[in-house]
Image: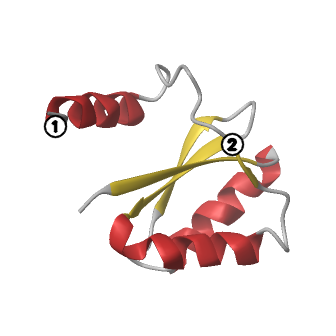
Amino acid sequence: MKLLEIYLETLPEHIAYLKFIFESYEEVGIIRTIDRKKAIIVLLAMDDFADTARGILDSLKRDVPVREIPPPLDNSGDWFMTELAAESARKRP
């Protein structure tokens, strides 16, 4: 299985709401905050749940301003994402 990373930008006041919604859908995905001030988050979902996660995200876009963005160049402030990137690099052939 592969981990899907969907980077998103929203307003700071919507981060908790987005986290809550994805936590309520157990096993679909989790939200990590990458940059609280810029309101950049990442949705982490296993590829088996990619369609479901994108469906939830599409539905949320009707309620809150959220848009997909490219991965930030610097994730050094988030230890989890740094570790995830290092693990992914070790697995590459």
Which structural element holds mark 1? helix
Q: Residue at x 56, y 21 (%)?
A: 73
- The answer to which of marks 1 and 2 sits earlier in the sequence is 2
The answer to whether the residue labelled 1 contacts the one labelled 2, judged by CB atoms less than 8 Å apart, is no
* Whole-percent x, y for residue 54 in the image: 59, 70
At 34% from the left and 74% from the top, the residue drawn is 48
* Element at label 2: loop
Horizontal relation, residue 12 to residue 57: left or right: right
**Residue under pointer 1:** 91
Eyeballing the image, is 53 above or below 8?
A: below
76 up-or-down from 54: above or below: above
Front residue of this view, candidates 49 and 64:
49
Type of colouring: secondary structure
* Quadrant of the drawing holding the N terminus: bottom left
| Residue of label 2 | 69
Residue type indicated by callout 1? Lys
